[in-house]
Amino acid sequence: MSIAIQTSMITGNGSATFTFPSTIGAYAYALQQFNLQTLQLGTVIQRIGLALRPRDGTGVGTTSLIIDQQMLLDQVDLDGSWAQVAVVAWLGSTNPPGLFLQNQNGITVDQMSSGTSSSPVSTGSPPMYATAAIAGFSYQFADDKSDFLGIGAGVGATPDPYASTPSVSVVGSGIWTGDSAFTGVVDAALIATTGDDLGLGLGYLPNPAWGMNVVDRLPGLGGAPVGAAAFLIQSFFCQFCINAIGHDTPDFSQLTTGVPSDVVQLNVPSDGNVSFRSVQQLCGCAIVDEGPVIFSAENLVANYLVAETASG
């Protein structure tokens, strides 16, 4: 029985197969990085997001998990839009002791409030760790001609104060600003543990600086080198500069957030460390003095949940 972590890229409305060496007992999937872009520079959009869903007949009780992806963006460039999806799985047992992995989808959010999931998870005893990561989101403006100013999402986990036994609930928040109200949902992956000997290292990584960064050794791996790591997006926000051009905000072109898997280096610069780079970009296009001008966001924030397993 062991923890396994895998990542894979899914392009457009495609799918990815995660194959493991033994039977999956429990799993959770989340976004490590995503890129949403339109077919043309500067597009007025009413809907934005992406959804991930496990395919029936895969997952628990089998050795493979198939994740299907759907892009929820108006005028989407399916060839240029993609996501890096990470799966954290428990192998070899249908009832992982002290470990709770679960996806909860459709947490309602809007500009006035955050949402709480409707399915608290009973942990039996108080959890040592209880956290969550973004597994998708879907937003819609009320007006089909709204400007685009900023966008963000975030999820987390909290003890359930109304439960008779120790439990945790997923909470979600979202924002999409312009000159129209928005409604939406966020999807979350829940990870909770009541023990510290599961071979899973977890850490919170707030808004890393530009360029290469290093994660120090995490508890939970017993001092062993890192065998696999994933940077699960816990929250993000990006916004165009307000009144930067003295005109309407730019129309949407591209949104990128996350950690590229090809720049993650295990046990660098030393055993137990992980080197990585966080990437964020929000681009749009506006007509200034009768010509198109590309603009980029100036307010960018991303926070991550780092999950690691030991080598061997």
Image (spheres, grey):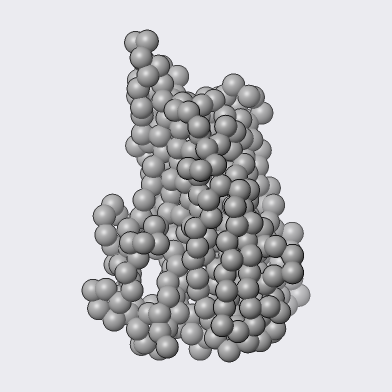
Residue 177: horizontal and vertical position, in percent?
53, 33
**Could you tell me which residue is drawn at 46 percent across and 71 percent down?**
307
Which image quarter holds the N terminus?
bottom right
**Residue furthest out toward the top:** 290
Counting from the top left corner in percent of width and height, residue 111 is at 60, 38
Q: Is residue 129 left or right of residue 163?
A: left
Q: Residue at x 43, y 54 (%)?
A: 258
Instruction: Choose between 77 and 217: the one closer to the eye.
Output: 77
Reply above or below: 219 against 302: below
**Left or right: 223 with respect to 134?**
left
Q: Position of residue 152 (x, y in %)?
A: 51, 44
Which image quadrant is residue 41 in?
top left
Seen from the viewer's position, the closer of residues 48 and 113 is: 48
The answer to whether residue 63 is above or below residue 45 is below
Q: Residue at x 45, y 67 (%)?
A: 230
Nearer-the-camera pick, 103 or 56? 56
Q: Residue 84's x, y, as percent?
A: 49, 57
Looking at this view, name the residue that lies furthest to the left. Answer: 269
In the rendered image, which quarter contains the C terminus? bottom left
Residue depicted at 63% across the width and 78% down the height? 63
